[in-house]
Amino acid sequence: MPRPSRREHLIETAITLFCEHGYHATGIDRLLETAGVSKKTMYQHFRSKEELIYAALRQYDGVFRNNFMKAVEGAGKTPKEKLLAIFDVAETWFNDNKFFGCMFINAISEYSEKDSPIRDISRQFKQLMWNYVFDLAKEANANEPKKLANELCLLLEGAIVTAQVSQKPEAAATAKEIGKKLIDSAVSS
């Protein structure tokens, strides 16, 4: 397997540090030391720390969403089963020793300005996740797929925050129980 470029290595290092320590708490010096690159190298690839954060979020979005959706698809045969599997996949994520919450929720908490590109990419990620749930709800023939997607995504977001803040990975199982009732009510068997 080819070695990642310096740019890719910086992004991967940034993802790890931002997840573990936060965005503001991860200074440029720490990032450069961990990545083993000079300031000159970093600034050849990124004009600012915020540009690196944006690149890290873009990279993480593609990888996380792809892996999450692939796991959901593999965990359920029918759209209804896949809707429930969202919470099983979340529980696996919450129990991972590298779970530090949602990288996008964390980004919004540190970059809350309405016109921030970091806020925009976080919003886009959440919209793409919602679109996936909405598509599953439509495929499951939910009587109100938009409403069901809103409810399930809210449950998932709440479970993510509870797992992170309260260190309760079982929040996914609780969300699944509630989600099952919502799904059963919205989808005829």
Image (cartoon, rainbow, N blue to C red):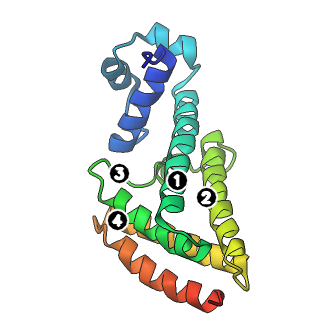
- Distance CA(mark 2)–CA(mark 3): 19 Å
- Distance CA(mark 3)–CA(mark 1): 21 Å
Disc 2 residue type?
Answer: Met
Front residue (pair 132, 48): 132
Disc 1 residue type?
Answer: Lys
Please report contact status of discs 4 and 1: CB closer than 8 Å, yes or no. Answer: no
Which numbered tag is attached to residue 100?
A: 3
Disc 4 residue type?
Answer: Ala
- Distance CA(mark 4)–CA(mark 1): 22 Å
Mark closer to the observer (2, 1): 1
Mark closer to the observer (2, 3): 2
- Distance CA(mark 2)–CA(mark 1): 13 Å
Q: Which residue is mark 2?
A: 129
Q: Position of residue 48 (x, y in %)?
A: 55, 23
Counting residues from the start of the chain, the first of labels 4 and 2 encountered is 2
In the rendered view, would you say 19 is above or below 69?
above
Mark 2 neighbour density, 10 Å: few (under 14) some (14–19) many (20 or more): some
In the rendered view, would you say 109 is above or below 47?
below
Q: Which residue is mark 4?
A: 163
Mark 3 neighbour density, 10 Å: few (under 14) some (14–19) many (20 or more): many
Disc 3 residue type?
Answer: Phe
Q: Which residue is mark 1?
A: 70
